[in-house]
Amino acid sequence: MASCDYRRVTRHFTSDYVERAELRDGTRVVVRLLVPDDKSLIAEGFAKLSAESRYSRFLGPKTALDDAELRYLTEIDQETHFALGAMLEDGDGRGAPVGLGIARFIVDKLSRLADPTTAEAAIVVADQAQGQGLGRLLMMRLCAAAAERGIERFRCEVLGDNTAAAGLLAQISPERTIEVESGVMTIDLPLPNVRPADPPAASPEGAMYEVLRAAARNAVEWTAAVRRLWRK
């Protein structure tokens, strides 16, 4: 198979990308790539997450993101570390933006499992926007952006004794590969074939959607690997 230089492919998800969408409850959102100036927006959004949501990301109590973490989350190359966010279209009604969700992937160049076509992925949706289709929309856009950058698989890690994860994996078993070591399950999932502008209703039901939806709902307990997606 001939190699493909993904840097030469015309991309949909660039710094100019802006998308407006309506959630199931009528909420209007704007989706775009994250930029360094989003630090305060991310800090405020993190502070509004429930204690359970924050715990699922950091495996421990955490009430705020520090300056180093905010730089890590926003000062990114949008290539091997890619992130997009969703905000209320009308903000808070007083001119201030309101964040509702973030989706990101990172290619881990240092892991023993490092592979330039595999990235770790995560989605977080604000408690107020849960169940309205935002997680599905972000998942589809994240997968399409990853494909533009030569990613073929997303990798997730969950605790091996996680009952919820075990049930989830039983449902998606035909579409994943798993390695188990020291009580940690590493799950590799092929990206679904979605186009950059596909409507959320066209999202393929399958392993990728189920795993990332569980992540957005904090329905599974993730390992320390997930913390790499949100902090150094």
Image (tube, rainbow, N blue to C red):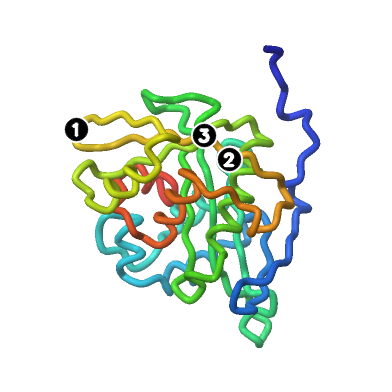
Residue 11: x and y, percent?
76, 40
User: In the image, 218: left or right of 194?
Assistant: left
Q: Amino acid at mark 3?
A: Pro
Residue 92: x and y, percent?
61, 83
Q: CA distance from mark 2 to mark 3?
A: 6 Å
Residue 139: x and y, percent?
56, 52
At a point 66% along the width and 44% down the height, the residue shown is: 194
Query: Residue pushed farthest top?
Result: 1
Residue 133 in the image: above or below residue 191: below
Quadrant where the C terminus lies? top left
Residue 76 in the image: above or below residue 34: above
Q: Secondary structure at mark 3?
A: strand
At a point 42% along the width and 48% down the height, the residue shown is: 211
Task: Check whether the beta carbons of the residues at disc 2 and disc 3 lie within 8 A of each other.
Answer: yes
Chain-order first, disc 1 or disc 2: 1
Residue 100 in the image: above or below residue 85: below
The residue singled out by tag 2 in the image is 192
Between residue 4 and residue 206, name the one nearer to us. 206
Q: Amino acid at mark 2?
A: Pro
User: In the image, 108: left or right of 203?
Assistant: left
Question: In front: mark 1 or mark 2?
Answer: 2
The residue singled out by tag 3 in the image is 190
Query: Residue pushed farthest bottom?
Result: 94
Residue 79: x and y, percent?
63, 38
The residue singled out by tag 1 in the image is 182
Q: Secondary structure at mark 2?
A: loop
At a point 43% along the width and 37% down the height, the residue shown is: 155
Quadrant where the N terminus lies? top right
Question: In front: mark 1 or mark 3?
Answer: 3
User: In the image, 117: left or right of 168?
Assistant: right
